[in-house]
Image: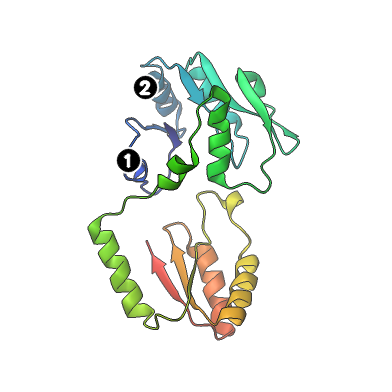
Amino acid sequence: MVAAKTNYEIPFFDINPYLDRVIIFNKSSIKTIIEFIRELRSRKYQLCFVPSTTVLSRTSHILNWISGSNDRVGVKSIDGKENRSQKDLNLKSDFKWKEKHQSVRNLEIAKQIDCDLSEEEINSIKMNFKEEDISFAKDYIFTNFPDQKKKIIAFHPGAGKELNIWNYSNYIDLIKKLYGDFNNYVLITSGWTDNNIVELIWTELRSANIEFKILHN
């Protein structure tokens, strides 16, 4: 797996225990780019995928091509929008993804090489949590949301890239709508890079007299 360098740690192997190697693409200098290419080309690959389930990244397609893989799999177009980097792929299809979840999109990419999961296999997929994480979650809910009959609705406004962040006003409208319908507890989760949008949201919620809790990572 190739991942872009971030300013926060991502526990790749905890998220997906089937990964055996992650290479970080650090484009901060010519030196780091050359080091990355050397590490990438240190092995031979039979298959490389560019999922493109959210954006059509030119860089991802270039790195896929540089890998030297025999088969490079990705998308030809998404909802009628042509992938301008499709020339770097030798196995590609047109996809209609407007109403489809990310997990389904990824599975459809893999189906191009006749790799598929049964409904039973899909339903068996679950996240593995450490006991300490489960204990923390239970304690946090018990302390902050004591009324077990009351719904808890959680929101995570942030994203790794600014372009992928939903406008804060949309979150405010959604939270107000749900709060008005259900009188629910409101939980906002915030990562290291989410302070700006979270601050805008909690300022508005306080003005609207909507109680909420913020869980910082």
From the image, tell me which residue sits under label 2: 39
Quadrant where the C terminus lies?
bottom left
Residue nearest the viewer, comparing 212 with 193: 212
Amino acid residing under circle 1: Phe
Which residue sits at x=40%, y=17%? 41
Q: Residues within 10 Å of mark 2 (few under 14, many from 20)?
A: few
Task: Between label 1 and label 2, give the one nearer the viewer.
Answer: 1
Res 170 → quadrant = bottom right
Number of the label disc, if any, that sits on residue 13: 1
Which residue sits furthest left?
Answer: 132
Residue nearest the viewer, comparing 99 with 31: 99
Which residue sits furthest right?
Answer: 80
* Mark before the other along the chain sequence, 1 or 2: 1
Residue 73 placement (x, y as % from top left)? 56, 24
Q: Residues within 10 Å of mark 1 (few under 14, many from 20)?
A: few
Amino acid residing under circle 2: Glu
* Residue 85 visible here: no
Residue nearest the viewer, comparing 130 with 84: 130
Q: Is residue 119 above or below residue 88?
A: below
Which residue sits at x=40%, y=83%? 147
Res 15 → quadrant = top left
Secondary element type, mark 1: helix
* Residue 113 visible here: yes
Residue 209 placement (x, y as % from top left)? 55, 86
Residue 167 placement (x, y as % from top left)? 63, 61
Q: Is residue 142 above or below residue 95?
A: below
Residue nearest the viewer, comparing 58 with 100: 100
Label 1, label 2: how far apart the Cα atoms are: 19 Å
Residue 122 placement (x, y as % from top left)? 46, 43
